[in-house]
Amino acid sequence: TGRGIHTVILCPCLIYGEGLGVNKESMQVPWLLDVARKYGVAKHIGSGSNIWSNVHIQDLVALYLLAIDKAPPGSFYFAENGANSMREVCAAINFMMGVDGPTQSMTIEEASAEWGEAPANHTMGSNSRVFAKRAREELGWAPRAPSLLDEITDVRVLFEYAAAGWWGYFWLSFTVRRSTPRLAQPTLLTLNA
């Protein structure tokens, strides 16, 4: 700030939702979807109990706009609107795909073969929990987008995957959705700190 530069740092974790820029996808959820498509079931590392905070891209954009307008120079803000374990995310993917059964575990070696050693260890097999308390209190940030699990299991998302070539999974999921009540809906862990 001594040189007239107004620096503000925003630190999101798992970002989900479709972006509007060159890279329209996030990392973790598409990686999990690719593995689920390959094996016919969603897979996580170990027990899948590792937890990542998450934020929808639309809410993150809203936070950037607020930070530009209101944040004091030199400030730092986390961006999150909830948190989920990788097992919960995989259960939502199974539901979206119409898989009637539990998620499956894979070893760190198997995960490294899918995503590479560093992403398997430091992204897909780790915890990353943050709380956006200051962004809410100081900037008035109020996330409004659907939760990560709602985004995955929403029927509109099924149509998007169908358009991207997931026809087999789409029709199976759509049939299950129309004929089966949501008995095993994934649990949402929302942190409002």
Image: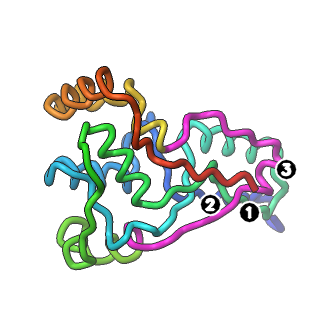
Q: For the residues carrying marks 1 and 3, which lies nearer the camera in this image?
A: 3
Residue range corresponding to the magenta coloring:
123-148
Q: Percent x, y for residue 98?
A: 25, 37
Task: Residue at 27%, 32% (x, y): give it.
Answer: 161
Marks 1/2 in contact by CB < 8 Å: the verdict is: yes
Write down the residue under mark 2: 11
- Amino acid tagged 3: Glu
Q: Principal SS element in the magenta part?
A: loop
Write down the residue under mark 1: 76
Q: How many marks?
A: 3
N-terminal of the two: label 1 or label 3? 1
Write down the residue under mark 3: 137
Q: Percent x, y for residue 191?
A: 67, 54
- Amino acid tagged 2: Cys
> In the rendered image of this protein, does residue 22 appear above or below residue 38?
above
Q: Quadrant of residue 9?
A: bottom right
Task: For the N terminus, give its image quadrant.
Answer: bottom right
Q: For the residues carrying marks 3 and 2, which lies nearer the camera in this image?
A: 3
Please, what secondary structure does the residue beneath circle 2 have? strand
Q: Nearer the viewer, residue 64 or 184?
A: 184
User: Is 96 one of the magenta-colored residues?
Assistant: no
Distance Cα–Cα, label 3 vs label 2: 16 Å
Kindly give the residue lying farthest to the top in the view shown.
178
